[in-house]
Image (cartoon, rainbow, N blue to C red):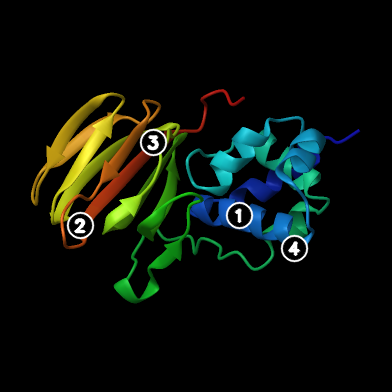
Amino acid sequence: MFTYMKFNYFWIMVDDLLTGIGQKIKAIRLIKNLKLYQVAEKANVSKGLISKIENGRTVPSLPVLLAIIHGLETTPADFFSGLKLTDGKNFLHQTRNNLKEISKEGATGYHYQLIFSKPFEGFVFESVILTIDPSSSREKVVTDAYEYKYMLEGSVEYWIENEMVMLNEGDSLLYDGRLPHVPINCGKTRAKMLVIYLYNQNRNHE
């Protein structure tokens, strides 16, 4: 029977790598040719939850993360190998040369650059730059976070459930990401926004 307690010390390695964790789960799953439902069954979680974690739309709790690692048929030591560890400083400095491109399933024409991700007292603060191509395509999504958007360039139609908000350069928007939402670039030039996610790590998962 898989137990969680003996792996608790690995949590210190997660620190500011929460988006990287989702990417690594997906990478290991694809390398091992495992389907979402196969990992989900072994981890005793839904495949929808794993998909949301892989795509950066939710943050796994420690028990869920360790269960997924078990479902991937690997060990915490192997899973965390190669992930950058926190250096123990009381500040986080990220240069533009170190921004990381991240991909999200079903987001054609949506380009994400991770600035940083950091947990604070049960919450995870994550910031990305999102660039949206003209005539991009995407369905509405949900996240387990409060989301703040600040328009840096261009304009988008921002749909939250069935209501549209027009965002122009300099405008901002704050909402509960559990509401279905999507930004749509109907213009002829790229639109760019700063996106800040505030995840609650204590929120119960599926």
Decide: few, some or many residues near mark 3? Use Cα within 10 Å; few <14, some 14-19, many ≥20.
Answer: few
Q: Quick one: label 3 or label 1, which is nearer the N terminus?
A: 1
Decide: few, some or many residues near mark 4? Use Cα within 10 Å; few <14, some 14-19, many ≥20.
Answer: few
Q: Quick one: label 4 or label 2, which is nearer the N terminus?
A: 4
Judged from the image, the secondary structure of the residue bearing numbered disc 2 is strand
Q: Quick one: label 1 or label 2, which is nearer the N terminus?
A: 1
Can you identify the residue that label 2 sits on?
191
Which amino acid type is marked by label 2? Ala
User: How much space separates mark 4 and mark 1, taking CA atoms?
Assistant: 23 Å
CB under 8 Å between callouts 1 and 2? Answer: no
User: How much space separates mark 4 and mark 3, taking CA atoms?
Assistant: 29 Å
Which amino acid type is marked by label 3? Lys
Please state the horizontal and vertical placement of residue 53, each as a whole percent of the image.
Answer: 56, 43
Judged from the image, the secondary structure of the residue bearing numbered disc 3 is loop
Q: Is residue 144 left or right of residue 191?
A: right
CB under 8 Å between callouts 4 and 1? Answer: no
User: How much space separates mark 4 and mark 2, taking CA atoms?
Assistant: 34 Å
Q: Quadrant of the N terminus?
A: top right
Can you identify the residue that label 4 sits on?
31
Question: In the image shown, does 120 or 137 lie closer to the viewer?
Answer: 137
Residue reaching furthest to the bottom? 97
Q: Which mark is residue 140?
A: 3
Can you identify the residue that label 1 sits on?
13
User: How much space separates mark 3 and mark 1, taking CA atoms?
Assistant: 33 Å
Which amino acid type is marked by label 4? Ile
Tag nearer the camera, 3 or 1: 3
